[in-house]
Amino acid sequence: MHKSAILAIAVAATTALTGIGYAVAQSPAASIEQRQAAMKMNGASMKTLVPMARGEAPWNQAAAIQALENLQRIGQQTVAMFPRGSGTESGTKTAALPAIWEKAPEFAAAAKAQADAAEALLRAARANDEAAFKSGFGAMGRSCGGCHEGFRAKQ
Ligand code: HEC
């Protein structure tokens, strides 16, 4: 099978599983729209989790697991949502900085930090271990700022 066909199937499978679709060789504008939607979902997940981590909302295991699964999945997919050519040079409004492509390994590491933090917290959440969730939550929050700091234009 042609390599691109295999990739297309893999992406279709991912899309079916996640509901966040991104196609191979789609337009920069489509990549930008989809990653901004994914980032908004990151924001929504954090809005669920932060009050629980601070003890301002009651522990809700199911909601925590769902939010953490979303954070893990998006963290795993973030690099693919930033294809070369989808920076400001695309002409579409984006806060993506050139550093994303100039320092690709660092960007990938920042995305992995999100996925890894979510994975660690998922172990706590699945064990219904609220204390471990709370004590480990700092890494999750730091993963957002850790990437925005160098890779996202200041708002
Ligand atoms: C690996 C890098 C990276 C990580 C990790 C990351 N972000 Fe982002 N985020 C970005 C970049 C780059 C943009 C700008 C995207 C664009 O405008 O094309 C962005 C944009 C956003 C936006 C604005 C979306 C919009 O409407 O335009 C929100 C909200 C956001 N991020 C939330 C989060 C949260 C919450 C986390 C942590 C759970 C997070 N991000 C983790 C890189 C990252």
Image (cartoon, rainbow, N blue to C red):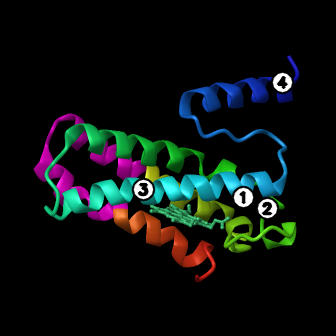
In the drawing, what numbered circle is on residue 86? 2
Dot 4: within a 10 Å radius of its alpha carbon, few (fewer than 14), some, or many (20 or more) residues? few
**Distance (Cα) linking label 3 and label 1:** 18 Å
**Distance (Cα) linking label 1 and label 4:** 23 Å
Q: Nearer the viewer, mark 3 or mark 2?
A: 3
Mark 2 belongs to which amino acid?
Answer: Ser
* Residue farthest toward the top in the current orientation of the protein: 1
In the drawing, what numbered circle is on residue 112? none
Residue 114 shown left or right of residue 123 in the figure: right
Dominant secondary structure of the residues highlighted in magenta in the image: helix
In x, y percent, where is residue 67?
36, 46
* Disc 1 C-beta below 8 A from ligand 1: yes
Residue 83 shown left or right of residue 103 in the figure: right
Mark 3 highlights which residue?
Answer: 44
Q: Give the range drawn in magenta.
A: 116-140
Check contact, mark 3 vs mark 2: CB within 8 A: no
Of mark 1 and mark 4, the one earlier in the sequence is 4
Label 2: which secondary element: loop
In x, y percent, where is residue 153?
63, 79
**Distance (Cα) linking label 3 and label 4:** 34 Å
In the drawing, what numbered circle is on residue 32? 1
**Residue at left 85%, top 16%?**
1
Of mark 2 and mark 1, the one earlier in the sequence is 1
Q: Can residue 113 be seen in this snapshot?
A: no
In x, y percent, where is residue 43?
44, 60
Q: Does the magenta stretch include residue 19?
A: no
Instruction: Pick the residue in front: 111 or 47.
Output: 47
Label 1: which secondary element: helix
Mark 4 highlights which residue?
Answer: 5
